[in-house]
Image (cartoon, helix red, strand yellow):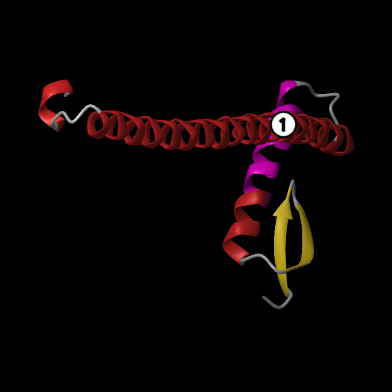
């Protein structure tokens, strides 16, 4: 997707952003940022726009770090589940082969004893 210019208003200031994202997506981000910053500024008269921006950025970074950690943990769990599934599949295949070998042995023993398949089965 080619870059486009999007005009965003955050805390009374206008910014032109070059992005490959849609204008609606960028506007939603700006709206959330504006809301979060205004909430901080309204909580105390001493909170400046710069302080609100820094505090909001730290909060977003915290969310990102926690989400990334959760995603990494999920990837590790999925990897472990896939490894367990592969091991179980190999064990099941080995048991199928063993079962087939045992069936052949039983059939061979039946033939040696000249018994029909219904007598032992």
- Viewer-proximal residue among 73 and 83: 83
Against 30, residue 54 (above or below) is above
Query: Where in the figure is residue 113, as x and y percent of width and height?
Result: 23, 26
Name, please, the residue furthest toward the bottom.
Answer: 2
Query: Where in the figure is residue 88, as x and y percent of width and height?
Result: 51, 30
Helix or strand or loop: what does disc 1 sit on?
Answer: helix
Residue at the disc numbered 1:
63
Residue 18 horizontal side relative to residue 111, left or right: right
Picture quarter containing residue 111? top left
- Viewer-proximal residue among 60 and 64: 64
Residue 107 horizontal side relative to residue 17, left or right: left
In the rendered image, the quadrant that contains the N terminus is bottom right
- Viewer-proximal residue among 74 and 32: 74
Image point 62% across, 65% down: which residue? 23
State the predominant SS element of the stretch in magenta: helix
Q: Is residue 19 magenta?
A: no
Image point 66% across, 65% down: which residue? 21
Q: Magenta region: which residues?
A: 30-43
Picture quarter containing residue 58? top right
Picture quarter containing residue 54? top right
Image point 81% across, 37% down: which residue? 57
Query: Where in the figure is residue 91, as x and y percent of width and height?
Result: 51, 31
Query: Where in the figure is residue 76, as x and y percent of width and height?
Result: 68, 32
Circle 1 residues within 10 Å: few <14, some 14–19, many ≥20? few
Against 10, residue 100 (above or below) is above
Residue 111 horizontal side relative to residue 89, left or right: left
- Viewer-proximal residue among 88 and 29: 88
Residue 38 horizontal side relative to residue 108, left or right: right
């Amino acid at each position: 997707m080619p870059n486009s210019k999007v005009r965003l208003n955050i805390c009374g200031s206008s910014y032109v952003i070059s992005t490959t994202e849609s204008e609606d997506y960028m506007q939603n981000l700006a709206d959330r940022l504006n809301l979060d910053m205004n909430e901080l500024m309204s909580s105390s008269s001493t909170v400046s726009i710069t302080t609100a921006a820094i505090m909001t950025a730290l909060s977003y970074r915290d969310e990102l770090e926690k989400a990334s950690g959760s995603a990494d943990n999920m990837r590790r769990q999925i990897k472990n589940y896939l490894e367990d599934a592969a091991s179980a599949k190999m064990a099941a295949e080995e048991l199928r082969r063993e079962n087939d070998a045992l069936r052949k042995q039983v059939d061979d023993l039946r033939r040696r004893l000249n018994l029909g398949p219904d007598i032992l089965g």
